[in-house]
Image (tube, rainbow, N blue to C red):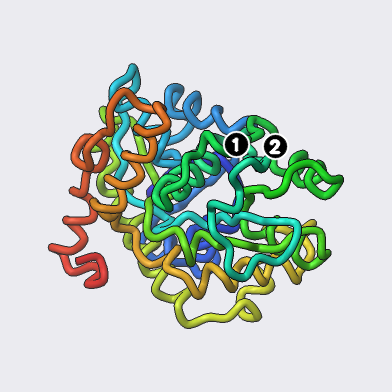
Amino acid sequence: MLQLNISATAHALNYLPQYYADREGLFAARELSVVATARDPWTGVLDDLATGAADVVLGGLWVPAMYAQGPRKLVVFAQVNHQFPKALVTRTPRPDFAWSELIGKTVLAPGIGGSAPYAFTAGLIREAGVNPASITFLRDLSTPMFVEMFEAGLGEAIVTDLVAAEAMQSKGTGYIASDYTVTGGLGPNSVYYCLADRYVELTDRLARFCSSLQESMHLLKSVTTTDLGPLLTAHWPAIAEEPLHAACERMLRSRTWDTVRIDPDATDRWMRILADEKMVHSAPSFVDLIDTAVLDRLSLDGVSASLR
C-alpha cells in the first residue's frame, strides 16, 4: 500500500471530506494510506515540505500565491473547499446586512492562522463598493482570543469560522450577519499543494487521493449531520454538539464540498483580492498556480465522471 503524508494548517471542519474519506475506507480501497498531521503554528507545514516529512500541504491558496514569485516552487493540484466557510458576526441580528453598515466601526479579524479571513472579507467589502480603509480592522490574534474579547465588548463585528459563529449565536453573544458560503460566491479556500520537483514522483498517489476525495464529496451530498455525528464527535470532542452540527449543516447545504477541481474564474477573483491587499506583487494567473494534470488524468481514465 502506498502512503501519502499530509501536513495541514489546521484540524478543521471544512476539511471534513478528507476525514470522511478516511473513515469510509475510500483511501484504503485505492491502496492508499493517508497520514495527516495538523501543525501549530501552521507555518510548520512549509518546514515539513522542505524536510520531506510531508508530501503534501493542506492549507490556503494564498500561500502558494505569495510564493509564486518567490523562493519556493509549489504546485497546487486540488481543493477541498470550493467556497470560503467563514462568517461575519455582529452584536445584534442584521437580517438585511450591508457592508456599508461597518463604516466607522471596528471589526475583529483573526490572523494568527493566516491572512485569508481578513483579505477575503476586504475583497467582499470592495466588491460591495465600500472602501475597507473606512473600517478599523484588528488583526493578528487567534480566533479564541478575539471571540473572548468580542464577547467582552470589543468591536462591533468579528470574522470567524462557522463553528465559532454558531457557538456565539447559540449563546446569544453574536449573530451571523453574513454567511460567506451564501454571500461570498465561489473560491478555492483550502487546497492541496506539493513541491514542484516532487509532483511527477507523487502523481500516482495524488490521483488515488483526489479520486477518493471526490467520491467522499459525492457521498456527503446524501448524508445528514445525524449520520455524521459519530465522526464529528470523534474529531472535535471538546466542541458542543449544537454549534458543530449547525456549522456542518451550513456547509452541507452550500457548495463548499462540491468538487476537488479548482475553478479558474474563482481563482482569478481570489488573486485579484490578494493583489488589492498588496499580498502579492501582481495577481498570479491560474496556470501559474494550478497544475490540472492529475485531475485531467482521472477524467480521461473515467475514474470519476464528476471531475470532467
**Badge 1 element:** loop
Viewer-proximal residue among 297 and 291: 291
Name the residue located 75 percent from the left edge and 57 percent from the top edge: 91
Q: Residue at x 47, y 48 (%)?
A: 125
In the shown orientation, is residue 196 left or right of residue 135? left
Rendering coords of residue 208 (x, y %): 32, 56
> Residue 241's x, y, as percent?
76, 69
Crowding around mark 2 (Cα neighbors within 10 Å: few <14, some 14 to 19, many 20+) is: some
Any mark on residue 40, and which?
none
Residue 174 drawn above or below residue 117:
below
Marks 2 and 1 sit apart, C-alpha to C-alpha, by 7 Å
Is residue 260 something that shows in the picture?
yes
Specify the farthest residue to the right. Answer: 152
Q: Specify the farthest residue to the top.
A: 71
Q: Which residue is mark 2?
A: 142
Q: Is residue 65 above or below residue 149?
A: above
Q: Residues within 10 Å of mark 1 (few under 14, many from 20)?
A: some
Secondary structure of the residue carrying tag 2 is loop
Compare residues 280 and 93 and report the one nearer the observer: 93
Of residues 174 and 250, the one nearer the viewer is 174
Q: Amino acid at mark 1?
A: Gly
Quadrant where the C terminus is found in the figure: bottom left
Question: Which quadrant of the view contains residue 271?
Answer: top left
Inspect this view and state whether residue 5 appears: no
Q: Are marks 2 and 1 in contact (CB under 8 Å)?
A: yes
Give residue 113's mark.
1
Direction from residue 132 to residue 63 in the image, left or right = left
- Residue 115: give x, y in percent of width and height: 52, 35
Q: Is residue 211 above or below residue 275?
A: below
